[in-house]
Image (cartoon, rainbow, N blue to C red):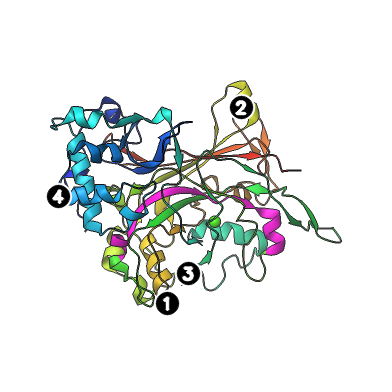
Amino acid sequence: MVELNETHDPTAKSWLDSANRADTDFPIQNLPYCSFKRRASEEGYRVGVGIGDQIIDLKALACSGVFSGSPLKGLEASLQSQLNLLMAQPHEIWCSLRLALFRALRQGAGEVERVRECLVPQQEVEYQLPCQIGDYTDFYCSIHHATAVGSLFRPDNPLLPNYKWIPIAYHGRSSSIVVSGQNFHRPHGQLFPPGSEYPTLAPCKRLDYELEVGILIGGGNTLGRSIPLDEVDKHIFGYCLLNDWSARDIQAWEYQPLGPFLAKSFASTLSPWIVTNEALAPYRCTWNRPKDDPQPLVYLESPFNRQAGAFDMDLQVLLETDQMRKQGCEPSQLSHTNFRHCYWTTAQMVAHHTVSGCNLQPGDLLGSGTQSGPSPEEAGSLLELSQGGKHQIELCNGELRTFLEDGDTVILRGWCDSGNGIRIGFGDCRGTVLPARC
Ligand code: CA
């Protein structure tokens, strides 16, 4: 089973009050990583760790001389603008740095004043991508999403024959991945609406979001060598939220026969925080395959994967329109689901990705695919919620949507909460649609 340690103790409190509040995403049991600097300053970006409403500046912490031994190795690997060097370290180094940070922040710790001097308020910072993303692969691992989308095009046969055998994916584009808060213009592309004689170049009219979990790879594998299913955990550094913005009308015309291309590569938004695989250990849950479905091939099957391969992680999508901002309304919830409904586990995704010998590297990003739950209101995209644009969705202030309008801000949230007052959150992943460029 999953090994829990001192850093998962649900009774642990920090000497920092804001880390002990019930509504914080960043209690002492979380300790997620980011890359940050003070807003509008000339400072360089550096690596930090979230705690309550603050960030510990790891560069400042290294200068303070509080750590030594194995945690110091991890700290030294964090003295970069982004996390790739730390991600490339062995799993044991990640664990020893986490333990040392936990002990330094726990109530009763020594050296509190020296650590306190390394804190920067989250309200005062801006973020960049937490790591330099190498390759980006996007999976399609929610059977509820695949079935709902397949039903729009093939009502009698929504799932293609390979779906229940292979964790389906395509290779995406990493250059257009942006950090939360960075907005983008509505993309242009070739559109060929039904009834038209020819395709035309125009701004996308069916702009959508996709609610996904991002998997960030730490230590990779040598080209030609696969990662066995039960060893995958040592290769996953952590998880984040990912909005795979999608231009449905561009996609409909371009996707055959090779799959998505420009419909998916104009922007993808990543949350600034990487929640480590270790922080999520208490929230693992069983993974099951319905007995009437094909059972996984041997390389995708293990008792551990059955016992603890899935994650009990809440996922939520909110929409904030221009009008809501003017009216001072709260954002409207579009859906709420859970990552445990995923048809394949993240370990199965990685084992499958490498089974051919394809090499993964520190900083590679895998998207889980749009996460939709079993009921229609748990859908992770507007394509599903609006049933292909046929049904209007009413927002909390009475506005209607089928697809996204200019000025719309989509906010993804994710958290694990087992009801003991500890919430391991991911922070917000947000992006706003700007009007198409002329
Ligand atoms: Ca996607």
The segment highlighted magenta reads 232-254
Residue 102 x, y percent position in the rendering: 21, 40
| Dot placed on the residue nearer the N-terminal end, 3 or 2 | 3
Query: From the viewer's perspective, is the residue at label 3 or at label 2 nearer?
Result: 2
| Distance Cα–Cα, label 4 vs label 3 | 47 Å
Identify the residue at the far front of this view. 42
Q: What residue type is disc 4 on?
A: Gly
| Dot placed on the residue nearer the N-terminal end, 4 or 3 | 4
Query: From the viewer's perspective, is the residue at label 4 or at label 3 nearer?
Result: 4
Callout 1: SS: loop
Q: From the viewer's perspective, is residue 326 above or below residue 168?
A: above
Callout 2: SS: helix
Can residue 123 be seen here?
yes
| Dot placed on the residue nearer the N-terminal end, 2 or 1 | 2
Q: Is mark 4 within 8 Å of ligand 1?
A: no
Identify the residue at the far top of this view. 327
Q: Which residue is located at x 35 percent, y 69 percent?
A: 221
Q: Which residue is mark 2?
A: 324
| Distance Cα–Cα, label 2 vs label 1 | 49 Å
Query: From the viewer's perspective, is the residue at label 4 or at label 1 nearer?
Result: 4
Q: Is residue 249 magenta?
A: yes
Q: Which residue is mark 1?
A: 356
- Image check: 135 left or right of 11? right
Q: Which residue is mark 4?
A: 69
Q: Is residue 325 magenta?
A: no
Q: What residue type is disc 2 on?
A: Met
Badge 3 density bin: few <14, some 14–19, many ≥20, Cα 10 Å = some
Q: Which residue is mark 3?
A: 164
| Disc 2 to disc 1: CB gap under 8 Å | no
| Distance Cα–Cα, label 3 vs label 1 | 19 Å
Residue 26 x, y percent position in the rendering: 32, 36
